[in-house]
Image: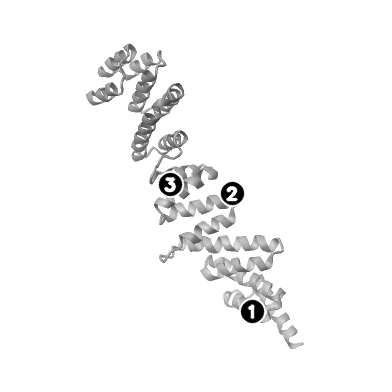
């Protein structure tokens, strides 16, 4: 308690109200000190009130007092940001994600250039879990600049873009994270996103544009469930372009990938395409 009092005194709390509040704190009566301070809106009283609220684990009330303080006296901004970061770190270490992220968020609201370090990803994940993807994206990007090999953060960033309909950006995030380690999660998403982008293009009648994405899915070999579909659609595009040799290779691959399920619709369709090509070439 003596250490707390010393810090508060050093903070400049020298008014009558503040002095009485300090005496109450010395007697371990923080709630009475807060009630006393609520009768004053001076910057020093608000500062002291916020610190007491943090001490008794009322971060929401502390934040309200600090917001009021900044509005009343903007010169406190630097001190407030430092205090918020210190308290946010304490809450994070105690597993209080909701409370700590609210403080980290307020820090960036007061100072958008503040460096949260590894806490950028921590805060981004909080926004991501709340489906606030537009808020999460810039924080993930800053965090990945610091931790480029954080696969979990990269996956979440990719999905954040994807869920906002920014599919090309999502694919780029995944591809830029694939290194020599060849993380299977990123490879899986590369194949998945590429295939789904290809399907969108095919529906729009842009088969030729879809080819590169189907080829990416095939090159990754993932997801396995999409491989025969990717070969089939690529084969159809080759067929439409009159490239029968390439089309046959794709359709044979569809059949090869389904050795025990020859009755599947996609296999029957591939066999029909092969028969059609044989007739065309024979004729």
Q: Is residue 279 left or right of residue 214?
A: right
Q: Which mark is residue 183?
A: none
> Label 1, on which residue?
246
Label 1 near label 2: C-beta < 8 Å? no
Rate crowding at label 3 as few (under 14), some (14 to 19) or many (20 or more) other CA atoms within 10 Å: many
Query: Residue 152's spot in the image, x, y percent?
Result: 44, 53
* SS at circle 3: helix
Looking at the rendered image, the quarter that the N terminus falls into is top left
Query: Which type of secondary structure does the marked residue at label 2 adopt?
Result: loop
Crowd class of label 2 (few under 14; some 14 to 19; many from 20; radius 10 Å)? few
Mark positioned earlier in the residue sequence (2 or 1):
2
Q: Residue at x 65, y 66 (%)?
A: 209
Q: CA distance from mark 3 to mark 1?
A: 45 Å
Q: Which residue is mark 3?
A: 121
Q: Residue at x 36, y 19 (%)?
A: 44
Percent across and percent down for residue 67 are 45, 26
Quarter location, residue 48: top left
């Amino acid at each position: 308690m003596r250490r707390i009092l010393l810090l508060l005194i050093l903070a400049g709390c020298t008014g009558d109200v503040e002095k009485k509040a300090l005496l109450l704190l010395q007697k371990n009566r923080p709630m009475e000190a807060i009630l006393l301070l609520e009768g004053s809106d001076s910057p020093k009283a608000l500062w002291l009130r916020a610190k007491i609220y943090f001490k008794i684990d009322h971060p929401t009330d502390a934040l309200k007092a600090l917001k009021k303080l900044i509005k009343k006296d903007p010169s406190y901004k630097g001190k407030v940001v430092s205090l918020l970061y210190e308290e946010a770190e304490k809450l994070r270490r105690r597993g209080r994600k909701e409370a700590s992220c609210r403080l980290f968020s307020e820090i960036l609201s007061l100072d958008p250039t503040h460096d949260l370090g590894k806490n950028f990803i921590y805060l981004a994940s909080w926004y991501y879990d709340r489906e606030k993807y537009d808020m999460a994206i810039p924080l993930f990007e800053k965090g990945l600049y610091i931790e480029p090999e954080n696969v979990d953060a990269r996956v979440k960033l990719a999905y954040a873009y994807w869920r906002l309909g920014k599919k090309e950006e999502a694919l780029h995030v995944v591809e830029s994270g694939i290194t020599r380690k060849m993380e299977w999660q990123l490879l899986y998403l590369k194949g998945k996103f590429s295939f789904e982008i290809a399907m969108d293009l095919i529906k729009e009648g842009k088969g030729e544009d879809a080819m590169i994405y189907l080829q990416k899915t095939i090159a990754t070999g993932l997801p396995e469930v999409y491989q025969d579909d990717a070969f089939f659609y690529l084969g159809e595009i080759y067929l439409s372009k009159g490239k029968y040799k390439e089309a046959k290779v794709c359709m044979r691959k569809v059949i090869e990938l389904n050795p025990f399920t020859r009755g599947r619709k996609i296999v029957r369709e591939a066999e029909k395409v092969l028969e059609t090509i044989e007739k065309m070439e024979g004729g």
